[in-house]
Every structure is written in C-alpha cells, then in structure tokens.
Image (cartoon, helix red, strand yellow):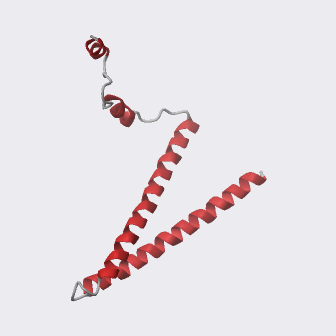
Amino acid sequence: MEIREKSILFARQKSRALYQREREFSERLDYLDTIICNSNSLLNISDALNEYEALKTELHSIYDRKGKAAMFRSKCRWIEKGENQPNTSSTWEKENIIGKPSTKSDQKTVKK
C-alpha cells in the first residue's frame, strides 16, 4: 500500500506541475501574440517571434504527451474490462507493410 500511495502522490505532483507549465506557456503565448500583433515594424519583434515559436513547439509537445497518455489509459480500460481493442489502425498498418502480401492468393504470386 505504501508504494501505491507514493506513486499516486508523485503522479499528482507531476500532473500539477505539467498543468502549471502549460498554463504559463499559454499565458506567455497570449502576451507575445499581442506584442506581435500590435507592433508596427518587423525589426523590433524578431526576439518575440523566436520565443513565440519555441513556446508553441513546447506547448505542442505537452499536448502530444497528454494525447498519448489518454490513449494508454483507454487501452488499459479495454484490457481491464476484457474488451477487444479496435483493430482499424493495426489492420491498416498490416495492409500497408511494403513487400508483405495482404491475402493468401497474393502470397502464392509473390513466392513464384
């Protein structure tokens, strides 16, 4: 039980820190956006543009991590409930493998 409590506490702290970081990036992006939009010349905003692009990339990576975590949680729920996972993406991947025939009739023609 002690390990579980500590892991839950760690996950909460990590989640809060990530949420705080995401919020700070969003606020900073909004601020930089107003600076860029209200500027009259492009010469004075090069630093702001560089920072804007860097923050946008970092925020995008945070969203990617959140998406992957959501997919992992849904897979865990499927396994816990004993349901089958949707096979659409895995079927597409199998069909698109280069050099691998998708049907038995194709296998015979490839071997010849």
Which quadrant of the figure has residue 49? bottom left
Q: Is residue 28 above or below residue 85?
A: below
Horizontal and vertical percent for residue 71? 47, 47
Query: Residue 50 or 63: which is nearer the viewer?
Result: 50
Q: Position of residue 94 (x, y in %)?
A: 36, 29
Residue positioned 68% across, 61% down in the render: 9
- Judge from the rendering whether residue 102 lies leftward or rightward of residue 41; answer left or right: right
Q: How many marks?
A: 0
- In the image, what residue occupies the spot 50% across and 52% down? 69
Residue 14 in the image, given as x and y percentages of width and height:
60, 63
* Quadrant assignment for the C terminus: top left
Q: Is residue 101 left or right of residue 80?
A: left
Front residue of 5/43: it is 43
54 and 2: which is toward the camera: 54
Task: Find the residue positioned furthest to the right.
Answer: 2
Task: Locate residue 81, reporting x and y percent.
Answer: 56, 37
In the image, is residue 37 above or below residue 108? Answer: below
Decide: is 20 above or below 38: above
Q: Quadrant of residue 90?
A: top left
Say left or right for 44 vs 81: left
Q: In the rendered image of this protein, does residue 102 appear above or below residue 32?
A: above
At 30% across and 25% down in the image, what residue appears?
A: 99
Q: Residue at x 37, y 82 (%)?
A: 31
Q: Residue 86 sits in which quadrant?
A: top left
